[in-house]
Amino acid sequence: MAATAAALTPLELHPAFPLLPQRAALLLQWPASMDRVRELVHSLRNSRRRHVQLMAAKQLTQLLQAQPVFSTAPGEQPQLADPGVHWDFLAAGGMQAALHLLCRVEQVGKVTAANLMYAACVVPEAATQLAADGGVQPLVQLLECTAADGASGIRRAALCTLALAAEQCDTVQDAAVAAGCVPLLVAILQEPNDSDHVANAAAVLSALVLRPGVHTEVLLTSGAAAALVRHVPDESCVCEISLTALSRLTGEPSPLRSEAVAAVAAAGGIPAAVQCLNGPSSALNWPSSEELAWTVPQLAAGLLANMAEVCPQLAADIQAAGAVPRLEWMLRNSTHRDERGWAATALANIRKAAAAAAADSGAAAQAAGPAAAALPRMCAAPGCGNTRGLRRCGGCHTVLYCSAGCSKAHWRQHKPECRRLQAEAVAGAAAAGAKQGSSAAGDR
Ligand SMILES: [Zn+2]
Ligand SMILES: [Zn+2]
């Protein structure tokens, strides 16, 4: 039994989900049954006595949290080993009962109810149910509570629940934005605050940028980019979460992508990200967690790669901030494949932008400095950095990929460029006559 428990990575190890304490202790103690779940949901819904309701809510929370969780790679959703109890809870009407409690009771009860929703929202079905039951707006309203004593627990419970539910469900994201959560989250990031609150507020914002462009406008007009940049140099998981949100904001194709990059740059995102490239060896006191130690430099390199790609004129600032030597060091020495891949992508984008800037200004390519050195031939998929086994894109015959997987992963971003390159090739061939040959010439 001990071996089974040890093989599970508890959810609380994930920095965005700090609310589940005694999970490991509970793992082996709660043989859940559907009857028990129904009975507790019944007490929660129907009891006239508040203490009975609260006790039922607490026991349901423990039952839900006692389910083993297989945590996954950063950026992926943790998975339940067996979501049976969660489905029983939903089938018995548990989410409506929790919401009813949330909207009726005093502060302590609100925390209990929000924690129950949080425990349930580990499964995407519960997040969907939460949105369908109209539970997002009351949770957002709880964010308006001031940070004074008792309200701190409410805010934390509401933020955790929103972060987890929004990460899994589009309708939760939409309902949260419609309820006006973005300015409240930005305010939490801007006030001097408990680092848990800041981490969870950043996690909700990060979930709101999962779908490229959908909520970008409200995020930018509310100052979310600047509020997140402010926390990039933090010495905690807030840094990782903020960088994740900013990478999502600047990384996906969206009409507002260049505005997002400009907002990040204006807020000082470049020096902040470069500071993070130094990861564990920097002057900052980084957490000893291995996951964070490699995730932070990787995310920082990804953010810089996005910025150089979208706004080539920022390449000079990125170089001036000292990114290039550090990225080159990462590319040569990092033991993490993802870190090397993002360093390679960032360097390629910086060099491309620097070369374009040098060509624009009419100067020789060398004038752009060391970053204008010859471009390495590498896979075009962001974060890959592979230099071997490259094959040309079947559409434009120009862009290189190491595998079908990378080509597929990059297609949404590459598609407009691919069409443009094909059109240019056709136009070029027509202008130069047949003797000029194929546009894909020159590959050895
Ligand atoms: Zn690749
Ligand atoms: Zn192509």
Image: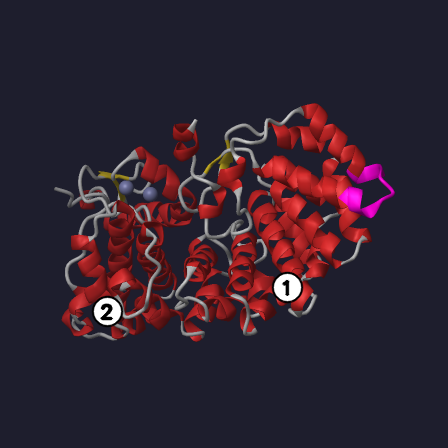
Q: Indicate the quadrant where residue 97 lies.
A: top right
Q: For this view, does 287 lie left or right of residue 379? A: right
Which corner quadrant of the figure contains ligand 1? top left
| Residue that numbered label 1 is attached to | 152
Q: Position of residue 309 (x, y in %)?
A: 35, 60
The three-letter code of the residue at mark 1 reads Ser
Q: Is residue 49 magenta?
A: yes
**Which of marks 2 and 1 precedes in the sequence?**
1
Dominant SS in magenta? helix
Q: Which mark is residue 359?
A: 2
In this picture, residue 46 sits left or right of residue 30: right
Q: Callout 1 environment at 10 Å: few (<14), some (14 to 19), or many (20+)? A: some
Q: Residue 318 magenta-drawn?
A: no
Q: Which residues are magenta?
A: 44-53
Q: Locate residue 257, reporting x and y percent.
A: 47, 60
User: Which is nearer the eye, 364 or 274?
Assistant: 274
Q: Quadrant of the C terminus?
A: top left
Q: Residue at x 68, y 24 (%)?
A: 34
Whole-percent x, y for residue 302 in the image = 35, 56
